[in-house]
Image (cartoon, rainbow, N blue to C red):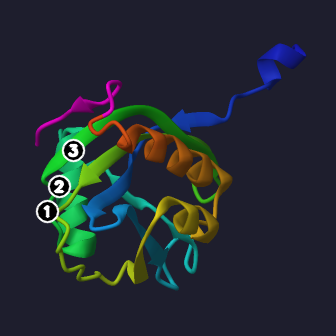
Amino acid sequence: MSKRQERTNIKIASPGVNVAVVKNDYDGWKFLILKRAEGESYGGFWGFMTGGKRGEETVAQVVVRELKEETDLKPTSIWATEHLIQFYEPEFDEIWILPLVVAVVEEDVEVKLSDENSEFRWLAHNRAKHLVSWDNLRVSIDKITDELDLFPARNWVEIKA
């Protein structure tokens, strides 16, 4: 058996979405940053909301369902961006590639966390960047912030649930 036949690849999967939940309040755009509850995957880590796709759901349907389940929020609009969040997921021994979607909510919303998350904060981009646990989210916050200056950004596509 040759070395080429012995080698296998790491599986690449795209099981869901990463969601930048944002609101525009009196002093600019804020990001919703969530802390994963202990006992959940990545317990204690801060980041964006994530959601897994079920059955034949569209990305927009995943966003609406997960936003409701995790925060009791409803988006006023959902935007597909050109950005992807990619990382190695050791629990599944896979490389995950997740589309980064922006969900806009009203300024005066009240977040009601599910058991998946233990804390939340609404933060301007510089504070959000310093709280999130992963470099790829810091880069994404910079990119999304630049694009929010032109809301909706010309490279975003609105998607409906």
Q: Quadrant of residue 73?
A: bottom left
Choose the circle earlier in sequence order: 3 or 2: 2
The residue at 28%/81% (across/down) is: 114
Q: Quadrant of the C terminus?
A: top left
Question: Where is residue 5 shown, x and y percent of the image?
Answer: 78, 17
Q: Quadrant of residue 45?
A: bottom right
Q: SS for tag 2? A: helix
Residue 118 among those drawn in magenta: no
Asked whether the beta carbons under mark 3 and mark 2 sit within 8 Å of each other, the answer is yes
* Foreground pick, 138 / 153: 153
Q: On the picture, is 161 further left or further right than 154? A: left
Question: Where is residue 130 shown, x and y percent of the image?
Answer: 63, 67
The residue at 13%/62% (across/down) is: 74
Looking at this rendering, what residue extends furthest in the front direction? 27
Q: CA distance from mark 1 to mark 3?
A: 10 Å
Q: Which residue is mark 2?
A: 64
The residue at 55%/78% (across/down) is: 43
Q: CA distance from mark 3 to mark 2?
A: 9 Å
Q: Which residue is mark 3?
A: 78
Q: SS for tag 1? A: loop
Q: Which residue is mark 1?
A: 74
Question: Where is residue 94 shown, x and y percent of the image?
Answer: 60, 44
Q: Which residues are magenta?
A: 153-161
Looking at the image, residue 31 lies above or below residue 103: below
Name the amino acid type tagged 3.
Ile
Question: Where is residue 41 shown, x and y percent of the image?
Answer: 52, 70
Q: CA distance from mark 1 to mark 2?
A: 7 Å
